[in-house]
Amino acid sequence: MQRLSPLDAMFLQQDSPSVPRQIASLAILEPGPQPLDYDRLIHVINERIALVPRYRQVPRAVPGGFGPPVWVDDENFDISLHVRRSALPRPGTTGSLHELVGRLIARRLDLDRPLWELYLIEGLTDGRVALLFKAHQALVDGSETVDLAQVLLEEAAHDRDIPHDDWNPRSEPNAAALVADSVNRNIRHPGEALRIAERNLGRLTRRLPLIGSDAQAPHSVLSAELSRHRKFASLAASLDDFRMVRDAHGGTVNDVILAAITGGIRGWMLTRAEPVTAKTRFRAMVPMSVVADDGLPTSLGSKVRGHLLSLPVGESNPVVRLHQVSYALKDHRETGSAVAANKLADLPGFATSTFHAVGARVASAEENRGHQIVITNVPGPKDPVYMAGDVVSEVYPCIPLSGNRAVAIGVTSYTSKVFFGIVADRDAVPDVDVLAQCIEDALLELVETIDKRRGHAPRGRQRPAKT
């Protein structure tokens, strides 16, 4: 029997109607010679699910709390309870897709079944379909288990030959066996049992003052008591624009992305008539990939650590904002442990969704550091990936909300585009689409600084790619 890690057990404990502990990603597929339908999707998943055995397991609590829950095979596993169909009303607009995604990511997973769902969303314009992958934060850790999208999305359009899997679930241990195994393990490993107890007690004592301070914290446009409802917005921009800004002003593409988000938050606050002064800043948790101490790759080629970044929202000059963000991240790059974006993008398979899941785990595990927003940015493949022969044209991460943080942003660069997925609390941020528009405007503002330096007339407004 394999136990849940203390972090995974914490995610299960903290799962609630207003804070469902699950991460999602949205992929848009272009129609191929044989468009993806529900039966083909079920067939492909049945072929690949053996590559992620935990997707057929459930967590079971140990009676008496003698240890963390354990993973056991689901003897009644039924894939049709996890793979579902939805359809957009005609004409399948971006707005209706966003509305559906917001509802689906707010819906809690059934903790008595394997902790994942996959929605096939039909009815998009031009015959396209979408896939919404959902997984509990206790499920995908990037080491024992990767995200389902990583094993379904492929680098080639043709199908792979996957060995047939004759899966027979192992019988679930009874309560006495669970208790006996936990007690024996605690006796054999008293240090581990003590560390788990100390870690859990430490988390509890650290969170107590945080709960009190959250209740008395001053109002913030990014802070709110979370409701049970979510909204989703997306934005697609040209990767070349980010590269041009980087080449003109220095730093990295990641710096430009974060500067655009910073400028977007500023512009969004101004549309709401929120007070913005030169000192207005927000603390962002930005998980960063680092190499192992020996320089060798670990799970998925890197580790991920939380990095706190102060977003200079009060700075009105877009270039100065960029320089401030770049300077704040300079120390991370100069440690020698930072992983180059091209190395992450060149990893085999579609590891992007797993990295977002790991980044969200890191941010959730470090909630006591007082950040106000989570931003994950993962470079994706430079070449297209496919799902059952259909090319994936767009990919949007959906990062979960927690604490009193009302907005989370995930960013993925893929082929020639940069895709932003913005999750917000529906009650606190009903205008999340305005935030997406303001991020686009902030990027355009940075691009126009290049045109002015070169003596060119500012280019016209560029619209994001439509889903």
Image: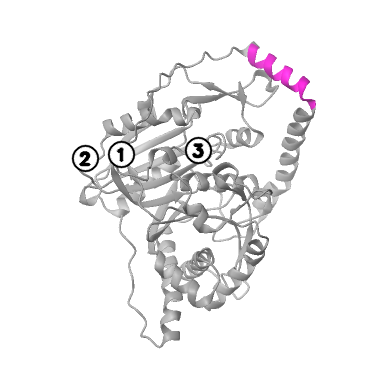
Q: Please, what is the three-letter code of the amino acid marked with disc 1?
A: Ala
Can you say which quadrant of the picture contains the C terminus?
bottom left
Please give the label number shown on residue 388.
Answer: 1
Q: Please, what is the three-letter code of the amino acid marked with disc 3?
A: Val
246 to the left or right of 179: left
Residues rendered magenta in the picture: 177-190
Q: Are marks 3 and 1 in contact (CB under 8 Å)?
A: no
219 to the left or right of 48: right
Q: CA distance from mark 2 to mark 3?
A: 28 Å
Is residue 189 part of the magenta span, yes or no? Answer: yes
- Secondary structure mostly seen in magenta is helix
Is residue 291 part of the magenta span, yes or no? Answer: no
**Nearest the camera: 20 or 36?**
36
Judge the density around disc 1: few (<14), some (14-19), many (≥20) Cα neighbours within 10 Å. Answer: many
Q: Please, what is the three-letter code of the amino acid marked with disc 2?
A: Gln
Q: Which residue is mark 3?
A: 146
Give coordinates of residue 345: x percent, y percent: 47, 53
Residue drawn where x is 25% and y is 36% of the image: 37
Judge the density around disc 3: few (<14), some (14-19), many (≥20) Cα neighbours within 10 Å. Answer: many
> If you read the primary sequence from the N terminus, does the residue marked by circle 1 or circle 2 appear first?
2
Can you say which quadrant of the picture contains the N terminus?
top right
**Nearest the camera: 445 or 190?**
190
Please give the label number shown on residue 34.
Answer: 2
Work out whether residue 23 can be spotted. Answer: yes
Give coordinates of residue 437: x percent, y percent: 40, 65
> If you read the primary sequence from the N terminus, does the residue marked by circle 2 or circle 3 appear first?
2
